[in-house]
Image: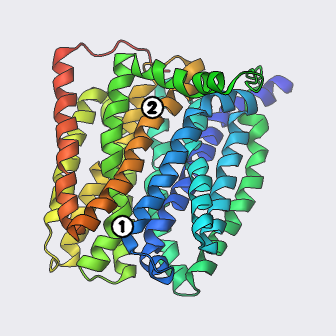
Amino acid sequence: MSALTAAMGAARAPRLALSVTLLVQTLAAVTLSVPSVIAPVMAPALGLPAQNVGWLISGIYLMAMLSGLNGGALVQRHGAIRLSQWALLGCTLGLVLLAIGHPLALLGAALAIGVGYGLPNPTAADILSRHAPPDRRGLFFSIKQTGVPLGVAFGGLIVPALLGLADWRTTLLVMAAPLLCITVALGAARGALQVTTDAAPRSGGGSIAEVLRTRLIVPLRDVLVFAPTRRLALVSLVYAFTQVSFLTFLVSLLKLEHGHPLALAAGLLSASQAVSVVARIGWGHVSDRWLDPTILMGVLGLLMACGIALLGLLPPSTPWPATLLVTMFCAATVVSWNGVFYADLVRHVPPSAVAQATGATQFMTFLGGMTGGGVFAWLVGRTGSFASVYAAVAVLPAIAGVLMLLSTRRTQPSNGTPT
């Protein structure tokens, strides 16, 4: 009977692992999308320009970079499920602090949401690398990554709906309440998914310099000295810069420059995310079956450049159906490369190092996200136009895509075994 129970539990583990990681990723993405969607209402109430949300997003990504880089050691010590609970707790606290609205509270919100957004990828990488079927890990990672567009879509729908019923402070608190409940409920999955390992050695006895070296510098160094992971990390920086620019400022572009109502602007963003969900799974399948992931990453760079350029060149008088088509194309490329990225990454990394390598490459990815929000906001302040900055940003993924394709002609594809 015990053997049968164990077998049944093993059969359920892949589905449970995917469900938990997808849920955590989705809720983290919802939380990250909230400041961008609520900015046109919240910023004027605080006496701030709407584009300043870019600086808040940059702060979130800075903290996400640091927490994710330390994710490998934290997973070893505390376990992936407990760390996932910490991530959701950070998201909950961040929404509460946003509702306070004081400058110091906004800083605290950036730190808390950054922790919440930085930990899900290392924890999911650990969970899925252990529990996903070996021949379907690329698909599992791609499905897990659909949590980002699902979260953005949900945020784009629920925030305007709640704003129609209550003020922005109440809206934030209402969204925080179920997050806290889910955080507690997630503990039920610990027994089935969290692998018991020897605790990571505590670094409290060493010097601060030694802690920084082992927790932050060594994981990043290991990724950057190995050509395949270095290439992926650097390209992800550029693609994340483009992705954050698209997601953070789309609602402001459509409302403030194109004159669309907030509900329509947020609705266009949400509708485009449905395409992104399908595209992430589709691109993951393409990379598994027909096209080398490195080549596909280069092709996606060129496609996202075209989409962002089109978005920036749209006249304000463009009918909303045409605007919807452009945002859908952007979502299918700009927001849909991540599953291919992680599926390619795990080919080059042994199972024991998946969480650490994911956190280290994520450091570069989030560096792109952090600079994307701040640099875009600065350029809008200098030019006074969201559209012109979008058109300029399109150059970056075009260059990265071309370089990625050129690299496949100079080197042989990796022989790494999927992990």
State whether residue 137 is above or below residue 113.
Answer: above
**Residue 300 vs residue 378, the one in the foreground:** 378
Rendered residue at 51%/53% (across/down): 60
Q: Nearer the viewer, mark 1 or mark 2?
A: 2
Q: Which mark is residue 269?
A: 1
State whether residue 112 is above or below residue 13.
Answer: below
Rendered residue at 59%/53% (across/down): 111
**Residue 104 vs residue 101, the one in the foreground:** 104
Residue 194: x and y, percent?
Answer: 73, 33
Rendered residue at 61%/36% (across/down): 123
- Placement of the N terminus among the 4 image quadrants: top right
Neighbours of disc 1 within 10 Å: few (<14), some (14-19), many (20+): many
Q: Which mark is residue 361?
A: 2
> In the displayed structure, does residue 55 sit left or right of residue 30?
left
Q: How is the image coloured?
A: rainbow
What amino acid is found at the position of numbered circle 2 in the picture? Answer: Thr
What amino acid is found at the position of numbered circle 1 in the picture? Answer: Leu
Q: Which quadrant would residue 73 be assigned to in this image? A: top right
